[in-house]
């Protein structure tokens, strides 16, 4: 009888143990629902980096020729006219990101400089006669205005060209720095000047332009975000892969830039933007 009693007690214990194991198994299954509630993404992938807030952005600074306006100046032809065919080919081979014609002119004699600037001015005047607003520029400006985001301009063109741009298209960028401001792009000085004028840190500002050597270099040297406008994809060529300064973002149109801003940045309104833009 004792043996039988022990058998009965052992059976009861085994039954209780099986019940406990079953409950534990169900608990473990129920404690892992997130791996199945989010298709294609395991819970372990939800790290703190995915929860990092978008960076703040309070202002945008634009290049003019080829960015806010359709590129109409034949720069290779202008460089050939200024440098001569042989020097043009030599300098081009040494500068994969582009030729800084103004930098080269600075080392010349006064008479040679005068002639070079006359050639450049003639090409620029021809460009003014064909001046067209870049598709998406007006819409982008409206978007920035509606969000009270400041906008400025830095160009290596002359002040007369900037004044004509403002007048013809009814857009205002402030400050708007032309090549009369020294030093000009790719030096970061003009962008840092605008940041100071706006009372903003460079990492709260984006430089937008169509030139790696001028616009992207200026933005990165200043410590700002840099966005390259590459309509045709020409900067995908191998010779541009090892340049010193690379953009944080690249877009093919100003329409795409608006979408990029909405998706990737926390746009911070400036109450004074309406008075300046």
Image (cartoon, rainbow, N blue to C red):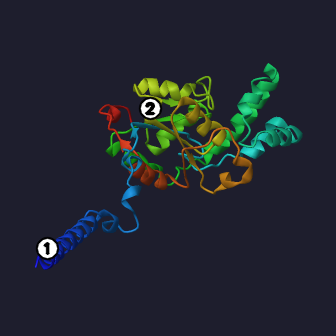
Image quarter where the C terminus lies is top left
Residue 139 in sight here = no
The secondary structure type at the circle numbered 1 is helix
Q: Residue at x 69, y 34 (%)?
A: 121
Front residue of 107 and 223? 223
Front residue of 266 and 42? 42
Sequence-earlier tag: 1 or 2: 1
Q: CA distance from mark 1 to mark 2?
A: 90 Å
Image quarter where the N terminus lies is bottom left
Above or below residue 262? Residue 19 is: below
Quadrant assignment, res 26 = bottom left
Quadrant assignment, res 180 = top right
Please give left or right for residue 244 compared with residue 17 in the image.
right
Please give left or right for residue 76 compared with residue 225 in the image.
right
Please give left or right for residue 183 compared with residue 262 in the image.
right
Q: Residues within 10 Å of mark 2 (few under 14, many from 20)?
A: some
Residue 216: percent from left, percent from top: 59, 39
Q: Which mark is residue 9?
A: 1
Residue 150: percent from left, percent from top: 40, 36
Q: Residue at x 30, y 67 (%)?
A: 37
Q: Residues within 10 Å of mark 1 (few under 14, many from 20)?
A: few
Quadrant assignment, res 212 = top right
Above or below residue 253? Residue 178 is: above
Residue 103: percent from left, percent from top: 73, 29
Please give left or right for residue 56 compared with residue 15 in the image.
right
Residue that label 2 marks: 174
């Amino acid at each position: 009888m004792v043996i039988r009693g022990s058998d009965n007690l052992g059976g009861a214990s085994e039954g209780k143990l099986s019940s406990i194991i079953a409950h534990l198994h169900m608990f473990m299954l129920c404690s892992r629902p997130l791996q199945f509630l989010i298709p294609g993404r395991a819970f372990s992938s939800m790290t703190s980096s995915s929860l990092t807030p978008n960076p703040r952005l309070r202002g945008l600074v634009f290049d003019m020729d080829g960015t806010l306006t359709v590129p109409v100046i034949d720069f290779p032809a202008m460089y050939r006219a200024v440098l001569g065919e042989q020097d043009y080919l030599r300098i081009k081979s040494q500068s994969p990101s582009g030729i800084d014609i103004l930098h080269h002119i600075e080392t010349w004699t006064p008479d040679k400089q005068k002639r070079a600037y006359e050639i450049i001015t003639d090409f620029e005047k021809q460009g003014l006669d064909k001046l067209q607003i870049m598709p998406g520029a007006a819409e982008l400006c409206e978007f920035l205005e509606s969000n009270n985001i400041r906008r400025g301009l830095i160009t290596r063109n002359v002040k007369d060209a900037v004044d004509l741009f403002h007048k013809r298209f009814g857009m205002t960028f402030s400050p708007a720095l032309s090549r009369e401001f020294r030093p000009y792009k790719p030096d970061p000085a003009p962008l840092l000047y605008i940041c100071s004028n706006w009372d903003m840190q460079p990492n709260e500002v984006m430089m937008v332009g169509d030139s790696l050597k001028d616009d992207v270099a200026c933005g990165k040297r200043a410590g700002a975000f840099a966005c390259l406008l590459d309509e045709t994809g020409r900067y995908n060529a191998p010779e541009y892969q090892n340049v010193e300064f690379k953009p944080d973002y690249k877009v093919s149109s100003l329409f795409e830039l608006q979408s990029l801003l909405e998706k990737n940045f926390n746009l911070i309104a400036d109450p004074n933007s309406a008075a300046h833009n």
